[in-house]
Image (cartoon, grey):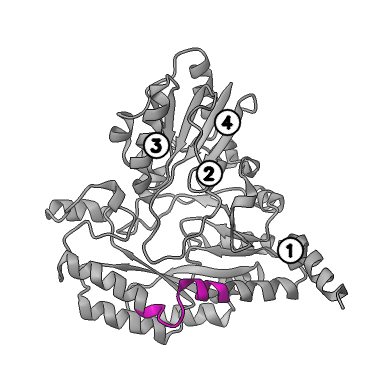
Amino acid sequence: MKMTLIYPSWPKLDRQTEFHLPPHGPVVFAATVPKTVELHFIDENLQKIDFSENCDLVGLSVMLTCQLPRAFEVAAEFRKQGIPVIFGGIATMLHSDEVALHADSIFLGEAEGRFAAVIDDFQSGGMKKVYNYMDNPPDAGLIGTARREILNRELYNYRGVQMLDLVHASRGCKFDCFPCCTGFLGGKNFRPRPIDKVIQELEAIQNNRLFIVDNSLSQDRQWLIDLFTAMAPLKKKWVSHPILDDDQILRLAADAGAWYVYQAVFDTSDVIRNRIKRLKDHGIAIEGTIILGTDEQDEDYIKRLVDFLLEVELDVAEFTILTPFPHSPIRASLAAEGRILSSDWLKYGADKVVFQPKLMTPEKLQEMYHYAWNTFYADGGHAIKMGKLFRKVIQREMEDDTYYRYNPRMKRSFAKQKSQP
């Protein structure tokens, strides 16, 4: 049988440089699809959907809430032709009741060890309306190497620079932070993959630059020691969410190739200042993730926060507006207070105000969002600062002799230039 797997397009974050990383959810899911299924993948952010393509089943992998409106349009077009559609992914789990109205079937939870049964049901004519495994995650040992061969690799570059490959070493998160849905999606228990399987997958990735997309690299100190020690010989360069603020862990992370981390900056305290300093001391750059619109913030607070980011010389910053996604602790709180202003999912891209702020108007918060981006990047813009980060990693790759190993075309180009008179 033939299955077409589609990753729908969505509106990108206002003010951010547009680039496209290879999507993680679809390639991880693809590893659970039986090899007897002929699988064709389309990333609609970079490719056009051929609605006349001959296939037996369409799968929609939907990560973001703001992907849903387009996903519903795509599903409707295929279903109109009599081709059944199954939805899965994070947004499907967050909006399961609504998604079910647009689908022949929905898959909730993690697919390892489960999706072959869905294919069996489909081929026997008995595919269920809902497959719900939310409360029963699979053993982490079942998580296999993602099927990155379904991607068109040539599409994932920015101005000739190969984008990072995404990989994960664990699932679940014990922290349950107020704006986050991870506790609902992946559970509140830390579930690490066997380290030998993680290393096996890292070795299989033909890219020196990775994004380790684990919710947090600060949940189990001994596991981090073992993971980073095992990663060091690979000489990969990687980005991640926060790493445990511990000198030994940071040293091991740097030795293992930590390039930069996404660090939440929620105030101007010495705690944050010192955390940024320690990362820099270990040669790890920082992309600050800054949520605007929390209850303690007013216009002056946001201005002082942006000044602080410039003072501590943050490498890159990504500003977003607090967004009350379904099943996050903050949505429950704002809903109870009657402060949700919109459930138009297209506005849930984290750059639109969809709730009533406590200390300013929605219009003022939207204005301060633009102020933050414009002020922080007044000296050249997001692309310039990202370019500086890439120059740093290229220098490190040249120092440990991995740059040309993963960029053979650059080696040929450099040799050609040297040979010219």
Q: Along the polypeptide, which appears first: circle 4 or circle 1? A: 4
Image coordinates for residue 299, horizontal then vertical, percent = 21, 77
Q: How far is mark 3 from mark 4, CA to CA?
A: 19 Å
Residue 47, disc? 2
Q: Determine if the magenta segment contains residue 224.
A: no
Horizontal side of residue 236 vs 351, given as left or right: right
Identity of the amino acid at label 4? Val
Taken as a whole, is the magenta stretch helix, strand or loop? helix
> Real-space Cα distance between discs 4 and 1?
32 Å
Q: How far apart are marks 2 and 4 (CA)?
A: 22 Å
Nearer to us: label 2 or label 1: 2
Q: Which quadrant does the N terminus fall into?
A: top right
Q: Observer-nearest residue: 106 or 48?
A: 48
CA distance separating discs 2 and 1: 36 Å
Q: What element carries label 1?
A: helix
Place of residue 34 in the rendered image (x, y in percent of width and height, measured from the top left): 61, 27
Mark 2 vs 1, N-terminal side: 2
Circle 2: residue type: Gln
Q: Which mark is residue 233?
A: 1
280 up-or-down from 290: above or below: below
Position of 189 compared to 152: left or right? left
Q: Are marks 4 and 1 in contact (CB under 8 Å)?
A: no
Q: Which segment did they paint magenta? A: 375-388
Characterize the local packing of mark 2: few (<14), some (14-19) or many (20 or more) Cα atoms within 10 angstroms. Answer: some
- For label 3, the residue is 134
Q: How crowded is mark 3: few (under 14 residues within 10 Å), some or many (20 or more)?
A: some
Identify which residue is drawn at 35% across, 80% down. Answer: 375
Which one is in front, 9 or 232?
A: 9
